[in-house]
Every structure is written in C-alpha cells, then in structure tokens.
Image (spheres, rainbow, N blue to C red):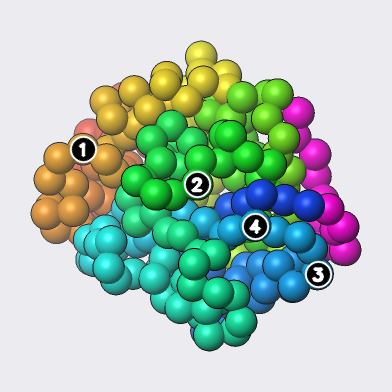
C-alpha cells in the first residue's frame, strides 16, 4: 500500500531513498530535499535512478550524466560515497521503476526487498505514482515524499500538452499491468520506443516523430498520424 507524504517532516527509518533524476541541476530541488531527509532520518542508502531523457542528444552512459552529477552533489554535501548508488539505464519515469525493481544493477540495492522512500517533485507526483503502480507490488513497504521545485508542466504550453498526452497514452496502454514488474519490463522492451535498439543513434527529429506516432497509437488516435506528420 502506498502512502503520500508532502514536503513536511518525516520521522522514520528507511533502508533506501529512491531519488528520481530529472531535476533542475542549477537548484537541485530533489537532491536538497534528499539531503534534509538523510540528515534528519535514519536512511541507509540513496539510489539515484535515471539519466538522460529519451529525446536527449546525449546517450545513457554509466559514467556521465545527470545521475553522476546528482551523486557527486550529494557526496559533496556530506553523504558518504559508499551510501550512494546510481542506475543510468532509465530514460523516463516508467523506466525508473522497471529497472530499479525488476532488474537492479549488480551491487545496487533492490528497492523491492527494502523499506523504500521514493522522492521526486510535487509537479511530478501524479506521473510518478501512476508509473510506480504498474511495477511495485502493493504489499511492499514503500512511501512517497515530494519536494518543492520548478517542474510544473502546464497543459497551456506545447511541451506540457505533449507530456500529458504521452503519459496518458502510456497509462492507457499499460492498464493490464498492475503491480507486476515482469509485465512492465516486457512492455518496456517490446513497446516503449525509448528502449528499442538504436533509439539514441537516430536523429532527435526522427525520434520526435516516433514519439508523436506512439502517443497517437497509445491514445487510440493512430488515424491522425499521417496528417500531423505532414505538418511537421
């Protein structure tokens, strides 16, 4: 069962803090919140999950990327290096949970076997909990905590609307998956474009068109693909 905690104080013991990457790296709102939680609660380790986004010009890299910069920031601000773990493979919110829970990297803690506190920003909370519900068993001892931050996608902007429709389609196409990491992993490997071979070798514009096509397909609007692509 999942429980929501806001940005207030949280007194508890946690084996693991799962910190989702993707924050503003000038202000580090999620990382700063993680520092506060680590310093005022009994938290065993921190796992930074996620690297570049699916439309990034960078490629996922175990040795460089947001996950490494966040880990370095945490370490420079007092968290021992041996308490910080990273996973570079996820390139979206759904992947954050699929990889961390279903296929942890060697030597990484397994959130599914631990009491885990999941941390992201308030503006990312709904998407995070919905993605998590597809992967994490309901009987796990997990909680959510949300930091303040500037991640606040708006439906009145093009990017905000695109993000909303993408996530809506993703949830629509995974309705059959309920707290099942194996099914979530299979979907990610077969259906999710970001995780297909050669995805990051393709030009960004080609990837954008595929995201549009997949968004329409997942939302049951494939008939609009042709007309919309001609406008791009």
Q: Which residue position holds label 1?
A: 196
Label 3 residue SS: helix
Q: Is residue 130 above or below residue 74?
A: above
Q: Residue at x 28, y 30 (%)?
A: 189
C-beta proximity under 8 Å, tags 1 and 3: no
Q: Which residue position holds label 4?
A: 44
Q: Residue at x 57, y 19 (%)?
A: 178
Label 4 residue SS: strand
- Whole-angstrom CA distance, mark 1 to mark 3, is 41 Å
Q: Which residue position holds label 3?
A: 40
Residue 188 visible to an observer of this rendering: yes
Q: Which residue position holds label 2?
A: 109
Q: Residue at x 51, y 40 (%)?
A: 110
In this rendering, the label closer to the viewer, 1 or 2: 2
Q: Earlier in the sequence, mark 4 or mark 1?
A: 4
Label 3 neighbour load within 10 Å: few <14, some 14-19, many 20+:
few
Q: Is residue 70 left or right of residue 15?
A: left
C-beta proximity under 8 Å, tags 4 and 2: yes
- Whole-angstrom CA distance, mark 4 to mark 2, is 10 Å
| Magenta stretch, residue numbers | 1-12
Residue 19 visible to an observer of this rendering: no
Q: Earlier in the sequence, mark 3 or mark 2?
A: 3
- Whole-angstrom CA distance, mark 4 to mark 1, is 34 Å
Q: Nearer the viewer, residue 55 or 98?
A: 98
Label 1 neighbour load within 10 Å: few <14, some 14-19, many 20+:
few
Q: Earlier in the sequence, mark 1 or mark 2?
A: 2
- Whole-angstrom CA distance, mark 4 to mark 3, is 12 Å
- Whole-angstrom CA distance, mark 1 to mark 2, is 26 Å
Q: Which mark is residue 162?
A: none
Q: Is residue 168 magenta?
A: no
In this rendering, the label closer to the viewer, 1 or 3: 3
């Amino acid at each position: 069962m999942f429980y929501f905690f806001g940005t207030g104080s949280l007194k508890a013991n946690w084996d693991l803090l799962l910190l989702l990457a993707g924050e503003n790296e000038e202000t580090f709102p999620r990382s700063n919140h993680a520092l506060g939680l680590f310093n005022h609660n009994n938290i065993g380790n921190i796992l930074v999950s996620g690297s570049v986004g699916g439309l990034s010009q960078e490629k996922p890299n175990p040795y460089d990327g947001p996950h490494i910069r966040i880990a370095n920031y945490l370490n420079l601000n007092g968290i021992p290096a041996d308490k910080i773990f990273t996973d570079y493979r996820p390139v979206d919110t759904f992947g954050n949970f699929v990889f961390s829970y279903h296929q942890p990297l060697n030597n990484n803690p397994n959130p599914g076997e631990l009491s885990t506190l999941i941390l992201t920003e308030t503006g990312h909370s709904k998407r995070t909990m919905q993605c998590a519900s597809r992967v994490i068993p309901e009987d796990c001892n997990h909680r959510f905590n949300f930091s303040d931050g500037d991640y606040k996608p708006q439906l009145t902007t093009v990017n905000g609307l695109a993000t909303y429709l993408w996530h809506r389609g993703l949830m629509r196409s995974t309705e059959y998956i309920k707290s099942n990491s194996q099914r979530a992993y299979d979907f990610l490997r077969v259906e999710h474009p970001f995780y297909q071979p050669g995805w990051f070798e393709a030009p960004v514009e080609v990837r954008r068109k595929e995201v549009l096509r997949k968004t329409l397909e997942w939302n049951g609007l494939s008939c609009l693909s042709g007309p919309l692509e001609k406008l791009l």
